[in-house]
Amino acid sequence: MIELRQVRKTYRQGGNQIHALDGIDLHVAQGEFVAIMGPSGSGKSTLLNVLGALDRPDHGSYRLGQDQVGELDDDAASDLRNRRIGFVFQSFHLLPRLTVLENVLLPLRYARVQDPGAEARARALLERIGLGARVGHLPGELSGGQLQRAAIARALLNRPALLLADEPTGNLDSKSAADVLELLRELHAAGQTLVLVTHDPAIAAGAQRTIHLRDGRVVEGAQ
Ligand code: ADP
Ligand code: ADP
């Protein structure tokens, strides 16, 4: 479902060139659960941004399903993001003045589509994730683990082909992290394609496959 070929991304820092991604070849099949690990500065966030169509490779190709993502213009990339990709962040990114339910419904506004089934779907997702009793609460009233589960529900609202998570357990205690991992594993068992970045070997061990990056290259696990 995902195919990266010789993807490069170079940044300029002062007079230097930084090869954040230095020729990445990567294949992820539909329904796979892949963890990306590597030291700080090895290119993990850049790779996730490329996979999420937030950032374009300077060189090489990225195919997501039928779409050649690197060739899309900004509007088409944004549309692809809204319709096909869900994002989960370390810091949850829930809006503090909206209820849990309103937060989960946010992707609808971004996608600017009429979707009369969305609220029922949001409620069902929250129920499934164990937050059925929290739909009307504000984020400030929830624990970290609950916040991340709500953020995962939001990421799933538009039924994304690909769920991306950047250190989704990085701000959680180990019990909450284990709960979030369990949820991700359930999603995987239900067929969701999942790519996450993590520093935590226990989280990576819950994935099907781990890709190790170093200096913008895959050093282990490309296929
Ligand atoms: P990781 O997520 O593994 O810590 P990153 O993908 O954030 O690594 O960064 C890879 C390299 O690219 C690092 O050397 C980083 O400093 C550099 N880099 C990332 N984003 C930018 C940017 N917007 N401008 C300049 N350099 C960047
Ligand atoms: P974390 O909590 O994991 O540190 P960051 O704020 O660093 O999250 O965001 C990770 C990456 O996702 C950044 O490169 C940022 O540009 C991008 N990003 C942040 N907010 C959004 C958003 N609402 N939608 C899409 N991408 C986002």
Image (cartoon, helix red, strand yellow):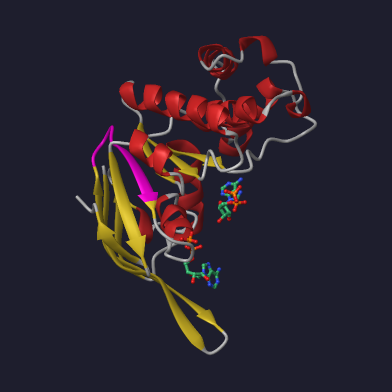
- Residue 208: percent from left, percent from top: 28, 36
Above or below, 213 against 63 in this view is below
Q: Is residue 33 magenta?
A: yes
| Residue at the image point whose x is 64% and y is 31% from the top | 106
Instruction: Report the magenta residues as a range.
Output: 29-36
Question: On screen, 203 above or below 45?
Answer: above
Q: Nearer the viewer, residue 186 or 125?
A: 186
Q: Quadrant of residue 126?
A: top right
Q: Is residue 15 visible?
A: yes
Q: Position of residue 131 (x, y in %)?
A: 61, 15
**Frontmost residue, 24 versus 117:** 24
The quadrant in which residue 109 appears is top right
Residue 105 appears anywhere in the view: no
Which residue is painted at 50% across and 13% down in the image? 128
In reply to whether residue 145 is colored magenta, the answer given is no
Q: Residue at the spot x=26%, y=35% of the render?
A: 30
